[in-house]
Image: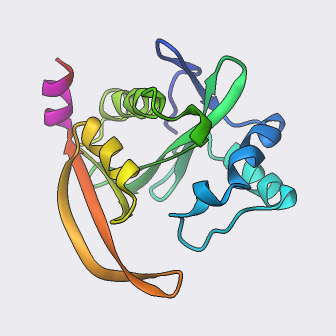
Amino acid sequence: MFQPPYPLRTARLTLRPMVPGDLDDVYAWQSRPDVVRWMLGAGPRTREQSRASVTAMVAEDALRAEGDCLTLAVVADTRVIGTVELVWRSQADRTAELGYVFHPDHGGRGLATEAARALLDWAFGEFGLHRVYARCHAGNEASARLMARLGMRQEARHVESYLFRGEWADQLVFAVLDREWRSAEG
């Protein structure tokens, strides 16, 4: 089993496992159309749907086997303002996928970058990954900018590669290798 030494702390944030008491904060962004706009198959959630989401995220506190998801609450002051996650895609290839969702009221201050950087530091350091990638809808410019700020390079644009809300959509793929992460951080 692999998990960060909780909590992870940055200059402005605390990253920790989700708890049931995070429901109000999570519902505050999961119920917003502007937040779920780019999420595949997701519409604004009801409070009960957010409760089920939080329940699932509470169980995602460690990486036990390939395919597992580690989801961390990103706390600023006393509020959960978003989540960062790492999905263990391949043990043999030491590869994982990065994901994140943040409440838009906390945008524009570098908090998402700070949180994702902390998770990537652990992923490449203690967890020992070789490669981390992330994907987004080609129209999600904010997500693509975040990946670039993290030092990830755009590796692909998959043209009309998936159905998104009834339309064929392009997907961007970004990635960073351990050696690139270490040289950028050093």
- Colouring rule applied to residues: rainbow
Residue 179 magenta-drawn?
A: yes
Is any part of residue 177 visible from this angle? yes
- Tell me the residue at 22%/37% (across/down): 151
Residue 163 percent across, percent down from the top left? 45, 84
- Most foreground residue, 19 or 149: 149
- Compared to residue 124, the image places residue 30 above or below, namely below
Residue 171 vertical placement versus 105 (above, below): below
As rendered, which of 7 and 102 lies closer to the eye? 102
Residue at (69% x, 53% y) in the render: 30
* Position of residue 6 measured from the top left corner of the image (x, y, whole percent): 58, 22
Q: Residue at x 75, y 38 (%)?
A: 25
Question: Is residue 21 toward the left or the right of residue 130 in the image?
Answer: right
The number of discs equals 0
- Does any portion of residue 90 appear in the rendered image? no
- Identify the magenta region: 178-184
- The percent position of residue 167, horizontal first and vertical second, equals 45, 86
Q: Quadrant of residue 23?
A: top right
Percent position of residue 186, x then y: 16, 17
Q: What residue is at 31 percent from the left and 27 percent from the top? A: 125
62 falls in the magenta region: no
Question: What secondary structure predominates along the stretch shown in magenta?
Answer: helix
Q: Residue furthest top?
A: 11
